């Protein structure tokens, strides 16, 4: 999935945005940029991985979220998520 395909919605008056991407392997990615997200100050994005309503720890990220992402970094993370085997 390409960054430009994400459908962002506004979160607040301060410029916060969020988009979701659903994958055939059952995972959902939340791509977000808001005042509290990692990289917001630099115009960068944070991505979190969900399975159902649960935030999932990703060993390769050593966390549940990965921050400080450029649009290209978001695309790389989306490809990674798409290729996770159940």
Image (tube, rainbow, N blue to C red):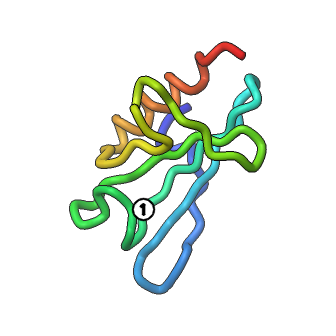
The secondary element bearing badge 1 is classed as: strand
The picture quadrant where one finds residue 11 is bottom right
Residue at position x 35%, y 47% in the image: 67
Which residue was labeled with disc 1? 33
- The quadrant of the picture occupied by the C terminus is top right
* In the depicted structure, whether residue 15 falls above or below residue 61: below
The picture quadrant where one finds residue 66 is top left
76 vs 8, left or right, is left
Crowding at mark 1 (Cα within 10 Å: few <14, some 14-19, many 20+): many
Residue at position x 41%, y 51% in the image: 46
Residue at position x 31%, y 54% in the image: 44
- Residue 39 percent across, percent down from the top left: 28, 57
6 vs 85, left or right, is left
Residue at position x 58%, y 55% in the image: 19
30 vs 60, left or right, is right
Which sits in the foreground, 32 or 1?
Answer: 32
Which sits in the foreground, 71 or 57?
Answer: 57
How many numbered discs, if any? 1
- Residue 70 percent across, percent down from the top left: 31, 44
- Residue 55 percent across, percent down from the top left: 62, 45
The picture quadrant where one finds residue 22 is top right
Q: Residue furthest left?
A: 42
Which sits in the foreground, 59 or 25?
Answer: 59
């Amino acid at each position: 999935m390409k960054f430009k395909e994400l459908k962002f919605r506004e979160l607040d008056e301060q410029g916060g945005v969020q988009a979701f991407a659903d994958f055939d392997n059952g995972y959902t990615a939340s791509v977000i940029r808001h005042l509290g997200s990692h990289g917001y100050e630099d115009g960068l994005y944070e991505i979190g991985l969900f399975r159902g309503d649960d935030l999932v720890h990703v060993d390769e990220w050593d966390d549940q979220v990965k921050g400080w992402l450029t649009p290209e970094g978001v695309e790389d993370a989306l490809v990674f998520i798409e290729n996770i085997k159940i």
